[in-house]
Amino acid sequence: MELGIAGRTAIICAGSKGLGRGCATALAREGVAIFIAARGADALEATAKSIRDDTGARVTTVQADVTTEAGRAALLAACPAPDILVTNAGGPPPGEFIQFSLDDWRRAVEANMITPIALIAATIQGMMGRGFGRVVNITSYTVKMPIGSLELSNGARAGLTGAVASLARRAAPHNVTINNMLPGPFDTDRVRSNWTRAAEVSGRSMEDVAKDSVRSIPARRLGTTEEFGATCAFLCSAHAGFITGQNILLDGGAYPGLM
Ligand code: NAP
């Protein structure tokens, strides 16, 4: 399918690895000029080169911590008027409510709620004025199915979901959509570090934790970054203007926990 977005520009936050990289690659394949941000220069430049080589697309890197005002300013200086905005950042650490300090909560809210809100606030009016815009927030299936060990994530991501719900409707007449993608377990570094932590806490081997985790997914496998990216590209496509304000689960059938 021709997605109708060749020549558009996109910001992809946290795009050097994992889900962000999957989205960046899929958009580049559609001829979108992409601006990818991450903190570490090595992975960022290696990913940019790989996407350029694979797709021939224009790829600009911005080495930035998107959870800081300075990082967001650098990203928006490089691409002040994106047609497409994919918000993303590292997830908060696992742990339990009573162990978290208020600063832990502030960091989680800053990274996974305020950061996307700030980027949307800076770009959405331009999108509405130009009559085209696609915002995709990478959140988590914890929005629909809170997970005991991920309370920082549960809270911050649910907050973002609520914060953009009305705006999505107000932007819709201008052909600007806002949707949230809710990944279940995907095959990235993040899922492996969660398994490592679960193994440490439970005293079980990482292989056992991984096996149990995959067994709990009806599809009996992790998601791939390619399929995540393809869904993102479709949501950003010319055909997806009637899909807005949605929370799109990609979890291999895990929600609502029926087997
Ligand atoms: P990942 O494979 O660990 O990749 C994280 C990416 O984000 C890297 O490119 C990293 O690069 C970048 N990054 C992290 N913090 C950043 C910051 N402050 N500023 C700019 N870039 C930053 O993680 P992932 O699995 O793709 O996860 C992406 C998001 O989805 C996370 O919030 C995660 O919690 C959430 N999620 C993932 C899953 C899953 O199964 N994978 C499930 C539910 C939710 P640098 O470190 O160099 O900055």
Image (cartoon, rainbow, N blue to C red):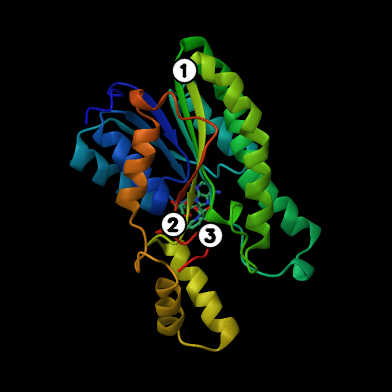
Discs 3/2, front: 3
Mark found first going from the N terminus, 2 or 1? 1
Residue 151 place in picture, x, y as percent: 67, 61
Pointer 3 with pointer 1, Cβ within 8 A: no
Point out the image quarter for the N terminus: top left
Mark found first going from the N terminus, 3 or 2? 2
Discs 3/1, front: 3
Q: Residue sitting at 62 percent across and 48 percent down?
A: 157
Residue 107 place in picture, x, y as percent: 69, 52
Residue 111 visible in the displayed image = no
At mark 3, the secondary structure is loop
Question: Is ligand 1 within 8 Å of the beta carbon of the residue shown at mark 1?
Answer: no
Q: Residue sitting at 35 percent across and 28 percent down?
A: 237
Q: Residues within 10 Å of mark 1 (few under 14, many from 20)?
A: some
- Residue type of the residue flagged with mark 2: Asp
At mark 1, the secondary structure is loop
Pointer 2 with pointer 1, Cβ within 8 A: no
- Is residue 170 rendered to the left or right of residue 11? right
Q: Which mark is residue 175?
A: 1
**For residue 134, above or below residue 21:** above
At mark 2, the secondary structure is loop
Residue 106 place in picture, x, y as percent: 74, 51
Q: What residue sits right under mark 2 in the picture?
A: 251
Mark found first going from the N terminus, 3 or 1? 1
Question: Is ligand 1 within 8 Å of the beta carbon of the residue shown at mark 3?
Answer: no
Q: Which mark is residue 256?
A: 3
Q: Residue sitting at 67 percent across and 53 percent down?
A: 108
- Residue type of the residue flagged with mark 1: Asn
